[in-house]
Image (cartoon, rainbow, N blue to C red):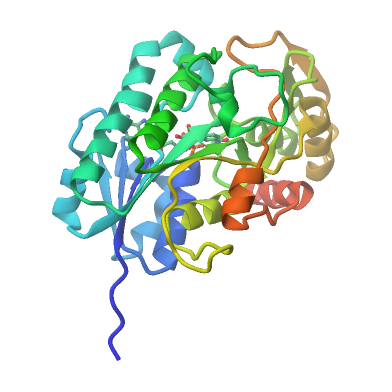
Amino acid sequence: MTIAPKAACLVTGCAGFIGSHLTDALLASGHPVVGVDIRPRAEAVNLAGAFADPRFHYMERDINEHGVLAAARQVCPDIRHVFHLAAVVMVAFSMDHPELTMATNSTATRALHEESVAAGAQAFIFAGSAAEYGDDPRLPLKEEYATDDTEQASPYGKAKYLSSRLMQTSGFGCSLRFFNIFGPRQDPSSPYSGVISKFITQAVAGKDLTIFGDGGQTRDFIYVSDVIRSYLIAGGILPNPRTGTAEPLAGIFNVGTGSIMSINELAQQAIRSAGASSAILHAPARAGDIYHSQADIDLFTRTTGFTPDVDFLSGLNQTVDWFRSTR
Ligand SMILES: NC(=O)c1ccc[n+]([C@@H]2O[C@H](COP(=O)([O-])OP(=O)(O)OC[C@H]3O[C@@H](n4cnc5c(N)ncnc54)[C@H](O)[C@@H]3O)[C@@H](O)[C@H]2O)c1
């Protein structure tokens, strides 16, 4: 019996935190991957495992240079699943660079989406964001709360909203609206990195933790392995547990846990998990940051049967272990 080869996948933003985990998972499930990222290969340290796999092809490229899928198909003609993660990811940076943010997070998404439709791709999965909801007080946040009238707090949130809406209005493609993702490989080095990776690196190094604002802000934290599972189901790589068939999703779906934690609680827990005695300091709140965020995950759960597997504390402890191992 011959086994049909698995379809190839395109992952933009493959060198980043989530993109590298997704690339590893796709390769592990037998799919060749073309990974696109603006980072030079030598700086793509998250892809060490992928580079050892002959089914992985890396393309250093800016997604603002349109024609990404055509270029990837020159390397791997049979790309059927497109996972689009490359983006300006820092909210504060987006406030200072609105044009670059709109070009990268909205215009380039539209161009890649158009190419994917024209090329007959089966799946287009876009990385949406909780920032699309602005500072909406109706918690937990339901997908339909973000509308054309929503005032996002940043160009990042606005551009993500425009791209998610494209998935809905075009009838092709899916936006997974992620809440706060954490886990190994999340970059702690920039001033605007994910709060968990920053707190853990500070605590593991015995440094004090700095909270912007009063720390009463809440977030819905989801561990990266759960996010990758949501990607594989939405992209039609894994069977939908609800229907038993592997079919790409269309539309907009929140992906979070539905539970929240305050930044003050998080700081205390990060210090405990790291076994540290760091102090907690407060600095002024940052422009563009929203105060409360909590996902209503009912739509994704009803559609796919997906529920997060990893509880917050064990995810945090695995992340602490990883940061220790990289010191
Ligand atoms: N981490 C989170 O909590 C979270 C939450 C919601 C949404 N998201 C979205 O998920 C996606 C991945 O986020 P992440 O946390 O892995 O970020 P990341 O910064 O680790 O990865 C993003 C990758 O995109 C690449 N990139 C940026 N601009 C590019 C360009 N113009 N052309 C090609 N590559 C480019 C970067 O080099 C980087 O490797 C992003 O779209 C982000 O907005 C992340």
Extreme residue in the bottom direction: 1
Residue at point 73% right, 20% down?
Answer: 210
Q: Is residue 26 above or below residue 137?
A: below
Residue at point 73% right, 27% down?
Answer: 139
Which quarter of the figure is the N terminus placed in?
bottom left
Residue 116 placement (x, y as % from top left): 25, 44
Left of 271 or right of it: where is 237?
Answer: left
From this viewpoint, is residue 302 visible? yes
From this viewpoint, is residue 224 visible? no
Quadrant of the rendered image containing residue 104: top left
Quadrant of the rendered image containing residue 281: top right
Q: Quadrant of ligand 1?
A: top left
Residue at point 46% right, 15% down?
Answer: 155
Extreme residue in the left direction: 74
Residue 272 placement (x, y as % from top left): 84, 40
Residue 113 placement (x, y as % from top left): 29, 38
Left of 198 or right of it: where is 272?
Answer: right
Left of 197 or right of it: where is 163?
Answer: left
Residue 284 placement (x, y as % from top left): 70, 8
Q: Nearer the viewer, residue 195 or 100?
A: 100
Q: Is residue 266 above or below residue 322?
A: above
Q: Is residue 10 above or below residue 110?
A: below
Left of 141 or right of it: where is 150?
Answer: left
Which quarter of the figure is the C terminus placed in?
top right
Q: Nearer the viewer, residue 145 or 55?
A: 145
